[in-house]
């Protein structure tokens, strides 16, 4: 396995852990909705976000694990979505820190222990990792494609 | 590679657009007209000194001559800074070992004496800045308290939350920690643990009055040191109802939604009350309001609005606290910086 692929797999695995942890934590946190209510940006949509966000995070984690195991196209898609979500969170934290009239954090678990600035640095780090992984995934002709592999192996069996 | 970078840029734009839309649909103040106008005084504030530190200051705890005594979030160290911000040294204090004093403590310096109190602490600390010695004294206030001010005769007044009723009230305490007065009529009995009626207490030694400025509505309570005879007035904005909702679960009270503060810090100087308003007037534009911190001036005798002036900002946020050092000089605490402004009448 090339070092390029190892890097992509490590980053994807980190994102898989992050989304799985964040999603489960939000689902199990009874205070999550009331925390969202405290966000000036999300107050109106707290009911919707409370249900969709944890599921979205878990689904992204699943997409990443499927992508890592089977298909680079799925992995690339998972990394694009991961980038979008982590960048959205980063920009949210930045605007809450510098522009919001009230700062409330609805992050769970160990992330809750981080200060807003630490959290911003953490998210910027993950945003950069997502970009790196997206750029390192091999080009189309070098990608692992699950369905193509299966069909080409079938072809070999028929030829024999 | 090109295609992937393009997708990353598109996703970035979508994310920024999403946040912009969330910001525009939020209940943030100043997105709409607030229904009042400001009259600007012919005062121009200029920054004459800015000093950045590795830590942020908690409050200005006292002054003596040209020396300012400032506290950080750690009660064991007091910084003494000259008024031009050029000289600084610190006094170390013995740890009084008082549980629950940190982080919400207040300190009052009357050099060389210092009193540190507040939060949920059962004790207050008395110290001497010259010797560094501290001692602790029990306070007999039946609940958490904050925002203490020292009035005449070595007496303190502070806002307290009664842990039984969850109502907030003002209490008077002597320097032995004994409660010697209680004012139950100033604040409404809202069972809010003092959250709805959050604010800032100040003492005006000239009129011997206590002034309590509300954060979440435009109320200013002015009452005597017997904690009675409230003669309230209002700041110029039109917010008469509190911009805050709380959730009550047994003995726990928490915010139900993001509160919107109407007023920030306030300060008394020379018979006037200066209030850092958080609301934009209808005759201010965004550039003026967001690039400055606006200060409204009120006459304490009758509560009449005198006019407003701006303190220019040095960063993205409004300044935290401001203190009049003399008629024309203002100290501002901004995150980990101290700023000195001079005020010139045009």
Image: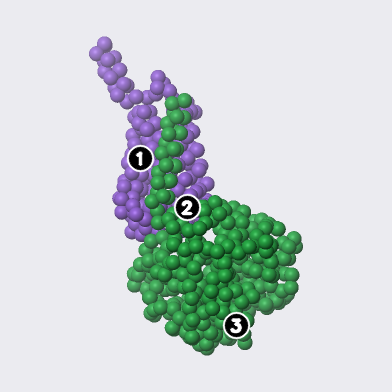
Foreground pick, A67 / A154: A67
Tell me the chain of label 1. A
**Nearer-N-terminus badge (1/2):** 1
SS of the residue under disc 2: helix
The letter of the purple chain is A
Residue furthest to the left = A158
Residue under label 2: A96
Q: Colour of chain B?
A: green
Residue under the point 50% across and 58% down: B283
Q: Which of pointers 1 and 2 indicates the residue nearer the eye?
A: 2
Check contact, mark 1 vs mark 2: CB within 8 A.
no
- Across and down, in percent, residue B249 comes to 34, 69
Residue under label 1: A60
Residue under label 3: B207
Foreground pick, B266 / A14: B266
Q: Are marks 1 and 2 on the same chain?
A: yes
Residue under the point 44% across and 72% down: B197
Foreground pick, A25 / B275: B275
- How far apart in space, not on screen, are marks 1 and 2 (Cα)? 25 Å
Are there few (<14), some (14-19), or many (20+) residues within 10 Å of tag 1?
many
Foreground pick, B333 / B32: B32
- Across and down, in percent, residue B164 comes to 39, 80
SS of the residue under disc 3: loop
Residue under the point 38% across and 66% down: B245
Tell me the chain of label 2. A
SS of the residue under disc 1: helix
- How far apart in space, not on screen, are marks 3 and 2 (Cα)? 41 Å
- Across and down, in percent, residue A136 comes to 47, 29
Give the quadrant of the N terminus of chain A: top left
Are there few (<14), some (14-19), or many (20+) residues within 10 Å of tag 2?
many
């Amino acid at each position: 396995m090339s070092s390029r692929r190892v890097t992509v797999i490590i980053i994807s695995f980190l994102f898989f852990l992050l989304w799985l942890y964040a999603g489960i934590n939000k689902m199990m946190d009874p205070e999550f909705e009331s925390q969202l209510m405290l966000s000036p940006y999300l107050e109106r949509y707290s009911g919707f976000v409370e249900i969709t966000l944890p599921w979205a995070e878990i689904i992204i984690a699943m997409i990443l694990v499927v992508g890592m195991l089977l298909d680079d196209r799925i992995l690339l898609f998972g990394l694009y979505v991961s980038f979008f979500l982590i960048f959205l969170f980063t920009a949210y934290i930045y605007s809450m820190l510098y522009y919001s009239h009230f700062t409330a954090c609805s992050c769970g678990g160990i992330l809750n222990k981080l200060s807003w600035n630490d959290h911003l640095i953490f998210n910027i780090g993950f945003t950069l990792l997502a970009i790196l992984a997206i750029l390192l995934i091999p080009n189309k002709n070098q990608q692992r494609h699950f369905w193509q592999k299966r069909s080409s192996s079938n072809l070999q069996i028929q030829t024999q | 590679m090109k295609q992937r970078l393009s997708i990353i840029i598109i996703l970035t734009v979508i994310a920024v657009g999403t946040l912009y839309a969330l910001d525009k649909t939020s209940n943030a103040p100043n997105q709409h007209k607030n229904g009042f106008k400001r009259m600007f005084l012919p005062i121009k504030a200029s920054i004459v000194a800015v000093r950045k530190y590795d830590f942020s200051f908690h409050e200005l705890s006292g002054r003596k001559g040209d020396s300012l005594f400032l506290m950080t979030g750690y009660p064991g160290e007091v910084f003494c800074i000259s008024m031009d911000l050029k000289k600084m040294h610190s006094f170390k204090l013995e740890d009084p070992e008082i549980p629950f004093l940190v982080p919400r403590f207040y300190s009052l310096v009357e050099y060389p004496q210092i009193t540190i109190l507040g939060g949920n602490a059962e004790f207050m600390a008395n110290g001497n800045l010259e010797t560094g010695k501290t001692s602790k004294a029990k306070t007999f206030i039946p609940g958490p308290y904050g925002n203490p001010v020292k009035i005449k005769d070595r007496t303190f007044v502070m806002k307290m939350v009664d842990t039984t009723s969850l109502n907030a009230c003002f209490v008077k305490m002597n320097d032995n920690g004994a409660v010697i007065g209680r004012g139950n009529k100033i604040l409404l009995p809202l069972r809010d643990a003092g959250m709805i009626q959050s604010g800032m207490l100040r003492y005006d030694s000239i009129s011997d009055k206590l002034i309590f400025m509300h954060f979440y509505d435009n109320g200013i309570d002015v009452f005597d040191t017997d904690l009675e005879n409230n003669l309230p007035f209002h700041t110029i904005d039109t917010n008469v109802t509190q911009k805050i909702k709380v959730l009550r679960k047994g003995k726990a009270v928490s915010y139900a939604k993001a509160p919107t503060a109407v007023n920030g810090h306030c300060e008394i100087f020379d018979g006037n009350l200066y209030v850092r308003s958080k609301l934009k007037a209808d005759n201010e534009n965004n550039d003026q309001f967001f690039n400055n911190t606006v200060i409204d001036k009120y006459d304490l005798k009758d509560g009449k609005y005198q006019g407003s002036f701006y303190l220019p900002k040095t960063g993205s946020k409004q300044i935290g606290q401001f203190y009049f050092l003399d008629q024309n000089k203002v100290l501002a605490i901004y995150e980990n910086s101290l700023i000195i402004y001079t005020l010139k009448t045009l």
